[in-house]
Image (cartoon, rainbow, N blue to C red):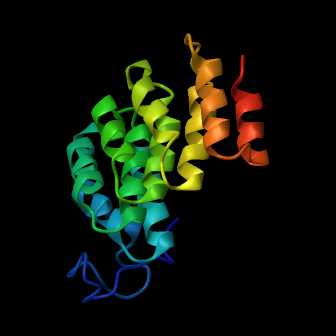
Amino acid sequence: NYSLTWLAEGSGLLDGYGGPPGERTIADLQGDQLVELLEHPNRWHRLTAQRLILERGDETMIPVVRQVFSDADRAVSRLHALYALEGLQAVEAADVQKALRDDDPSIREHGLMLAEDFPELYYAIVEAIYDQDDRVSFQALLSVGQFDRDGQTQLFAEALKERDFNHWYSMAVLSSER
């Protein structure tokens, strides 16, 4: 029961859906209205909307969720949308490629995790090893290890040299080596 959650008049995203507590709840919202909440400034609203989207499994929401992933200004909203697509089993290689090119490193990092399910993105993962963001390059090393390709040992050696044999990168390579 989501009766403790109501949207106040003038809240911005869903004007007109407010009322006294318990009268209009997030659970009452439908499709596009829930997807809009992925962009809400409050984390609880975003997480609840994402969970409801996944629980409902309504495939008609996929294009709208994909649009939020594509167009949202805030990285956290794009991330919620990306994982909503993944939860709806609708994430595509093109979505992951977009994530790997995102300006925000956290989106690139999560894109690498999702890229592990797309063998055609192997070389995009390899490129990310040289990302300027440490978390992205670290995740890229971990993700590359999910594939069994020729030349990976040399790739790992070059990556370690590039990172001055950093302890954490060494651990990533060791956990990725087959």
Using residue 67 as the reference point, say whether residue 143 is left or right of it: right
Q: In this view, does 6 lie above or below 123?
A: below
Residue 127: x and y in percent read 44, 35
What is the count of numbered marks?
0
Residue at point 63%, 25% (across, down): 145
- Give the residue furthest to the top: 150
63 lies left or right of 114: left
Left or right placement of residue 150 versus residue 174 in this view: left
Residue shown at 36% from the left, 73% from the top: 40
- Comparing 111 with 66, the one in front is 111
Residue at point 38%, 63% (across, down): 75
Along the line of sight, which residue is nearer the eye, 37 or 133?
Answer: 133
Q: Where is residue 42 in the image (x, y as percent from the top left)?
A: 45, 77
Q: In this view, does 135 lie above or below 154?
A: below
Task: Look at the image and tell me in which quarter the C terminus lies.
Answer: top right
Q: Quadrant of residue 98?
A: top left
